[in-house]
Amino acid sequence: MSRFELVSKLLSFLPPEAVLYEMEDLKPYECDGLSAYRQAPMIVVLPQAEEEVIKILQICHATKTPVVARGAGTGLSGGALPHTEGILLSLAKLKHILEIDPITRTARVQPGVRNLAISEAAAPYGLYYAPDPSSQIACTIGGNVAENSGGVHCLKYGLTVHNILKLRVLTIDGQVYEIGSNALDSPGYDLLALMTGSEGMLGIVTEVTVKLIPKPEKAQLVMAAFDDIQKAADAVASIISSGIIPAGMEMMDKITIHAVEDFLHAGYDLDAAAILLCEADGMGEEVTGEIQKISAVMQDNGAVKISISRDEAERLRFWAGRKAAFPAAGRVSPDYYCMDGTIPRKHLAQVLHGIEILSAEYGLRCMNVFHAGDRNLHPLILYDANQPGELEKTEIFGAKILKMCIEAGGTITGEHGVGIEKLDQMCLQFTPTERNLFHAIKAAFDPDELLNPGKAIPALHRCAELGGMHVRHGEDRFPTIPRF
C-alpha cells in the first residue's frame, strides 16, 4: 500500500496533528538516544487512546506494514530506529496514571508515563517506584518494560521485571491480552518475563501495573576515592562478600570523575583514579551500622578518602554526579558511543584494563561509569562523527569491549537492549540452536515479522555471513561491524 493510501486510512480516525508524514515533521523521530544510526520513518502516528492503537495495528497487519513502537526516545541501542517503509508508533500521548493503590502498593499506568512521575504520584502515600535509570526524568515506563531497564538502585531492588505485576499488551493484529497478575504468581507460562525486555518485537504494551515500595526511613551514601582502580574493584567484591547488599553501588574512573565534576560540581576527588559510591537504606540504626561496615571495608581495601553524606541534600548531590555522567560526556566530546556489557564481579579490573588497552590502540578516549554491584559496565567511547572513519573505528572498539565481556563469562547487555547496535554480538553470545529458538518465539507472536523488524535477534544468514563466529567455539576473528 502506498504512503498516500496509508495516510488516508489513518486520517479516517486520527486527527491531522496525530499523523505526520512531511519530512520536517519526521526528522525528530529518525533516531533514539543512540544517534549514530539515523533514518526517517515513512509515517509517524501519535494515538491518544488504546482504541486508536488497536486500529493502527489492525491496518499494519492487514497491509503488512512494519511498525516500530517508541516512547521518549531515550534508548541507547537503536531499538526505536524507525523503518523507512513503516509506521513509527509513538506512545508518548498515552501518559495517564490510571490508579495509585496504597493498600496493595501498586500503580496502574499507561506506557507514556515517565519513570520519575510514578514516584512523584506515589510520594503522598510514602511510596515510590524503585527502578531509577539515569534518564528517569525523561524515560517512559513502556520503554523501561521494552528494555528491562535497571538503574543505580537495581542491585538491591531489581530490574523492571522484578518490579511489575501485570501488562496489558496488544498483538500485531490488534488483539488485547493481559499477562501477569496482581498476585505474586500466576498459572501458565511466564509471559510477563518474556514480554519484559522483548524490545517491542512481540507486542505493544498499553498498560503497566507496577509495584510500589515504602520510602526507607533513612538513606545514606559513602563516597570513597581510590588511587588505583584495582583497589576499588576489590572493595566492591569485599562489600558484597561481607554480607551487605547495598541499595546502590556505582563506580567511575578518572576521566569520568573530571568530566562530571566540571559539569556538576558534585564534590568528587579530582586526584582519584576511581570513585566508588555505595548507599545503604532502611531503618535508622540498620543504616548507621551498614554505613560503618561499608566504610571499614573500603578503608581496608585502600580508600584514600572517604566521605559520608551528612544530609539528604548531600546524598542527592553525590548521586547527581553519577546520573549526570552521560550529559557530562556530551560536554567533553562532540559524540559518544555508550556500551552496555555485564561481567562477573571478579573480572572487573581485568576488563577495565582491557578497555584501557583498546583505548590506546584506537586512539579514542573512554569514560568508564558502571553499576559496580551488579557488574553492568557503561563504557562511553568519545569520538567525533565529523572525522572520517572515526565512527567506524568507534564501532569496532565497542564491539571488542562486548566480545571481552562475553569471554569473561558475561553478556552483551545489562539494561540497554540489543536493538541494532549489538546484532553481530548476538552471533557471539548464542549458538545457532539458541538463535533458532528466539526466532520461533518471535514467529509465534508475530509471524509476518512486522513488529520492530530487524532488531535484537540477527537473521540466520547474518551470523553465517560473519563466519559462523561463536565465542564458545574459540573463534578469535572479529569483523568490522556492517554499517546501517
Image (tube, rainbow, N blue to C red):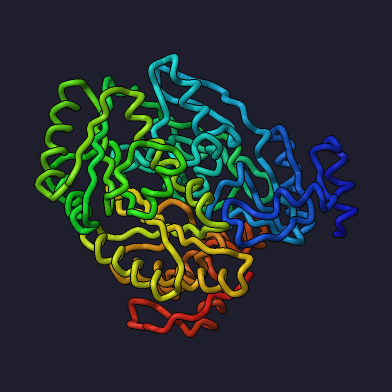
Q: Which x, y percent locates residue 454? A: 61, 65
Residue 141 relative to residue 454: left or right: left
Residue drawn at x 38%, y 17% as measured from the top left: 126
Measured as percent of width and height from the top left, residue 345 is found at 24, 57
Which residue is nearer to you in this view: 270 or 454? 270
Residue 149 percent location from the top left of the image: 45, 45
The answer to whether residue 110 is seen in the rendering is yes
Q: How many marks?
A: 0
Q: Is residue 176 above or below residue 437?
A: above
Identify the image quadrant of the C terminus: bottom right
In the foreground, 44 or 377:
377
Q: Nearer the viewer, residue 436 or 394?
A: 394
Q: Residue furthest top?
A: 124
Q: Is residue 281 above or below residue 459?
A: above
Q: What is the x, y in percent for residue 152?
A: 36, 41
Q: Is residue 54 or residue 402 the one in the foreground?
A: 402
Q: Which residue is painted at 33% across and 23% down in the image?
A: 312
Residue found at x 81% / y 43%: 19
Q: Is residue 239 left or right of residue 482?
A: left
- Can residue 409 be seen at all in this image of the molecule? no
Q: Is residue 109 left or right of residue 251?
A: right
Q: Quadrant of the N terminus?
A: bottom right
Q: Residue at x 61, y 69 (%)?
A: 387
